[in-house]
Image: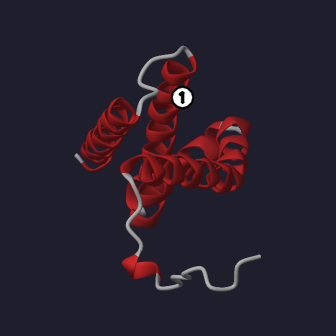
Amino acid sequence: MNKKRPVNLELNTISLPITAIASILHRVSAVIIWVALAFFLPTLYISLGSPEGFDSVKSMVSENFLAQFVIWGFLTAGGYYAMAGMKHIIQDMGHFEELESGMLISKVVIGVGIVISLLFGAWIWA
C-alpha cells in the first residue's frame, strides 16, 4: 500500500458532488423514518384502542410543538425518501445515468424535497 498518498481528514474542506449529497440524504431519511416508527407505532396503538385514546393523542399533537415537529420531520423524511426512491427507479430504467444528467436529477430531487418539506410545514402549522 502506498503510504505517500494524500490524506485529507478535515471534513469541512471536502467538497461532495450533488449526487453524493442526494444519496446521503436518502440514507439519512431512511434512518429518520425507522426511528420515528418507534414513536408512531405506540401512538397508533393508543389512538386506535379507544375513543378516549384517540382524543388524548389528538390533544397531545394539537398542543405540543415537539410532537408537531416530530410529525413534520417524519413526513419530510418520508417525502424525500419517496422522491429519491423514484430517482433510483428512473435511473435503474436507464435514464439520467450520465454525470451531467445525474447531477440534474439529483438537484431536482433535493429541490422537490425542500418543497415537500415546506408544504408539510405549512399543513401542520397553519
Whether residue 59 is visible, yes or no, is no
User: Nearest the camera: 89 or 72?
Assistant: 89
Mark 1: give few (<14), some (14-19) or many (20+) Cα within 10 Å. some
- Amino acid type assigned to the residue bearing label 1 in the image: His
Residue 68 locus on image (x, y percent): 42, 56
Q: Which residue is mark 1?
A: 88
Q: Is residue 61 above or below residue 115?
A: below
Mark 1: secondary structure: helix
119 with respect to 90 (left or right)? left
Outermost residue toward the top in this view: 93
User: Nearest the camera: 71 or 25?
Assistant: 25
Residue 56 locus on image (x, y percent): 56, 52
Is the N terminus in the top left, top right, bottom left or bottom right quadrant? bottom right
Picture quarter containing residue 93? top right
Q: Is residue 30 above or below residue 13?
A: above
Q: Give the total number of marks visible in the rendering.
A: 1
Residue 47 locus on image (x, y percent): 64, 41
113 with respect to 26 (left or right)? left
Residue 117 locus on image (x, y percent): 33, 45
At a point 44% along the width and 40% down the height, the residue shown is: 80
